[in-house]
Amino acid sequence: MKRLFALCLAFALCAVPMTAWAAPAWPSGVTIQADGGIVMEAGTGTVLYGKNMDHPYYPASITKILTALIVIESCDLNEIVTFSHDAVYNVEEDSSSAGIDEGDQLTVRDCLYALLLASANESANALAEHVSGTREAFADLMNQRAASLGCTGSHFANPSGLNDENHYTTAHDMARIAQAAIQNPTFVEICSSRTYRLPNMKRAPVEKYPDGFPIANHHKMWNRNDAAYYNGAFCGKTGYTSLAGNTLVTCAKRGDMTLIAVVLNGHLTHYTDTKAMLDFGFGNFQSLKISEFETTYTSLDNDMTIAGMTAKDTISLDLDEDSRIVIPKSAGFSDAVPHLSYTLDRNAPSNAIAQVNYTYGDQPVGRSYLLLGGVGGADGTGQAADGTGTDGGQASGGSNGNSGSQAADGSNGNGSNSGLAADGSNANNAGPASDGSNGNGSNSGGQAADGSNGNGNNGGLAPDGSNANNASPSPDGSNGNSASPASDGSNADSGSGASGLIPPGGGGGKPGGGSPNTATSFKIPSNLAAVLGIAASLAVITAIIVAVKLYVRRRQEAMALQRRQRRIQRLEDIGYSTAEFERIMEQYRSSTTSSYTPPGKRSRRKRFPFRRS
């Protein structure tokens, strides 16, 4: 319910009309000689300039960026790679090599230096065999990884980039691959090195090369002694074949911006084309931290109160601190247009409730996540007055405060995964607190006096077994339907039973408090009409969710009954009678508020079915 309330607030903020002013035009004026090219800001993925950036071209050895990324993600750098006859000799004549011979054994680290600095094709083949068994199987892995990075115009047929009509990519896809690669510190360390020495090679005996066979980086733009040197360039890869022409990937950082430039099918102008694109990017664009400028989605300037508590006391919305947008230097932050979306991408934090995408004209320029801040405490930490926390803190009674602050009597204030109560019973999803009160678990909720489970429907059951459906039942056992009814019997519509928002010292049916049917009070805000309209839509969605949860609850009743029996047995073992347990459950039934919070999705790094040779 708290999440829905936060969504209503966000909708209301979006409903406020804003005046649109003409923004400065997107910068232009850069040209390149290569057939395809792009310069993209790495942090946001903003494309600053592109020429045929989605047209497929042969990539040549810049392919090895993807090969290296997969190997680093798959292997320990100290693993030993044995070079097969096929790895060494199944390459084009006069293609790039580090002089590694059949039977040589190098570490994965050594092979990666040979791959990225000397562009060694035999190293690409040997690494592919080491990871996947065959080059063909590794190529399948390359295509899977490229797709996971959002590449849509590429197909990879080998790990080296040698000529193959089925091996192609786009400038935009290569920028995405490089964007992922430079987030890996190991890749950057190896790729940015100027020189390295390869040990244990037949063609480089230790007598002649006691420190190992020397290799050097082919990329010229971070060699201070070369005319192509570029201030800020730190990583990249060269490429050339007869079909691909000159290809080049270059990453450069200045200030708050990291740019990725890609050249495809260049005509001996790949360095000058790259310099032109990087100069254009650094000279015409700026990176701004969204949280330092955006106020629309975090300013909750309203006078709505629920049970005597303002929205500011219970809900806070924050923007991701690290998010940025990239816009022209001649523009201001307000020239970027925000678009609120409730479809979250896979990188969204667990407490994100929405995603704010920014555009400049038709150009995407960055995004941020709208995060649900502390709930339950005025300071935004989600803590109650007794100091219990929102993430597993325990009240003096021993009940777990996970995912919800607790009341002063030690009962759990909406603990979705609470721990053991003081009596030793498992409070798992709303067990009793030290005083025996139910902690209101959002999963496998409280149980009725008749032993049935109240889970799956965001609320416990009334004593007669009827479903309270997101609210404490009225004294006659009727359904409170998302709110405890008012004292006159009318439905308070998400009133005192909603979200656990109960004024200190009264309401909610707590001992020493007032009536459990305290009606909700509102000070009508100026944008109430917009909020009510949105709330109506959310109510329909909520009804669907409740129906699904009801279905889930029925499937879990058998297991819940077993859990209850075990819990009662444990209570009896420590001298807490079943009758006392039932009495306490009935006494505090009206004081609990049930809500269901889906468990956050765990971020898992994608694993691949590698085969080792």
Image (cartoon, rainbow, N blue to C red):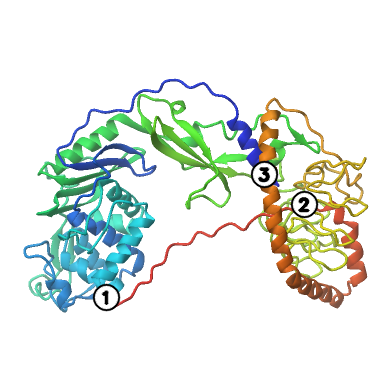
Residue 87 percent across, percent down from the top left:
17, 72
Tell me which amino acid carries mark 1: Ile
Q: Quadrant where the C terminus lies?
A: bottom left
Residue 194 seen anywhere in this rendered image of the structure: no
Tell me which amino acid carries mark 3: Leu
Position of 5 with respect to 212 (left or right) is right
Residue 240 percent across, percent down from the top left:
13, 53
Name the element at disc 2: loop
Where does label 2 land, which residue?
470
Tell me which amino acid carries mark 2: Asn
Where does label 1 land, which residue?
80
Task: Measure the C-alpha gap from mark 2 to mark 3.
Answer: 13 Å
Where does label 3 land, which residue?
4
Residue 505 percent across, percent down from the top left:
87, 44
Q: Nearer the viewer, mark 1 or mark 2?
A: 2
The structure residue drawn at horizontal position 17% and vertical position 36%, both measured from the top left corner, is 32
Out of 376 and 192, give the one closest to the viewer: 376
Position of 259 with respect to 378 (left or right) is left
Q: Earlier in the sequence, mark 2 or mark 3?
A: 3
> Callout 3 environment at 10 Å: few (<14), some (14 to 19), or many (20+)?
some
